[in-house]
Amino acid sequence: MTQDCIFCNIANGKTDTEFLYEDDHLVVFRDIKPHAPVHLLIVPKRHIRSVNDLTDDHRSILGDLFMAARDMAKKEGVDRSGYKLLFNVEKGGGQVIFHLHLHLMGGWKR
Ligand code: 5GP
Ligand code: ZN
């Protein structure tokens, strides 16, 4: 855990952010500034800066993130209508919080 990292603090329960899901490896919570009717962040508890910093050690965490996304899409009722999964990578890719996170966005009326 990195003390001045906001997602480390959130993922390790140091804030009042409400979790929609939590297990030993990750947490899921709503984005504070949603870009979609359903906008969740799926965040590993381990501090990893970005996709660029992934190593072989992180393979199982990546699987966990995607399985949590699949489950949360179903729970939020957007699995059949469809949704986007997104990693922003570094500044040029729109990353603002430098702690790996997967965006799940859906729920638009189309
Ligand atoms: P990034 O651009 O780094 O991929 O996405 C970071 C996301 O985190 C943004 O969509 C932003 O709205 C969200 N965010 C930033 N700070 C907080 C926070 O304190 N709580 C929550 N729930 N979301 C946050
Ligand atoms: Zn962190």
Image (cartoon, rainbow, N blue to C red):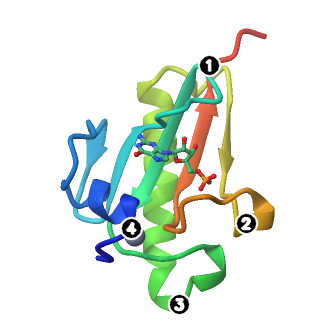
Q: Nearer the viewer, mark 1 or mark 4?
A: 4
Please tell me which residue is depicted at 57% across the width and 82% down the height of the picture. Answer: 54
Looking at the image, is 47 positioned above or below residue 6? Answer: below
Please tell me which residue is depicted at 33% across the width and 65% down the height of the picture. Answer: 8
Looking at the image, is 52 positioned above or below residue 23? Answer: below
Secondary element at image label 1: loop
Outermost residue toward the bottom in this view:
56
Indicate which quadrant contains ligand 2. Answer: bottom left
How packed mark 1 is, by other alpha carbons closer than 10 Å (few <14, some 14-19, many 20 or more), is: some
For the residues bearing labels 2 and 1, Cβ distance under 8 angstroms: no
Please tell me which residue is depicted at 73% across the width and 66% down the height of the picture. Answer: 91
The quarter of the picture where the C terminus appears is top right
Please tell me which residue is depicted at 58% across the width and 19% down the height of the picture. Answer: 37
Report the amino acid beneath label 2. Lys
Which is nearer the N-term, disc 4 or disc 2?
4
- Residue 71 spot, x, y in % from top left: 43, 39
**What is the distance, in whole Å, between disc 1 and disc 4 at their CAs?**
29 Å
Left/right of residue 108 with respect to residue 56 in the rendered view: right
Dot 4 corresponds to which residue? Answer: 5
Dot 3 corresponds to which residue? Answer: 56
Report the amino acid beneath label 1. Gly
Dot 2 corresponds to which residue? Answer: 91
Report the amino acid beneath label 3. Asp
**What is the distance, in whole Å, between disc 3 and disc 2 at their CAs?**
24 Å
Secondary element at image label 4: loop
Dot 1 corresponds to which residue? Answer: 107
**What is the distance, in whole Å, between disc 4 and disc 3 at their CAs?**
23 Å
The answer to whether the beta carbon of the residue marked 4 is less than 8 Å from any atom of ligand 2 is: yes
Q: Nearer the viewer, mark 2 or mark 1?
A: 2
The answer to whether the beta carbon of the residue marked 1 is less than 8 Å from any atom of ligand 1 is: no
Which is nearer the N-term, disc 2 or disc 1?
2
Left/right of residue 83 with respect to residue 100 in the rendered view: right
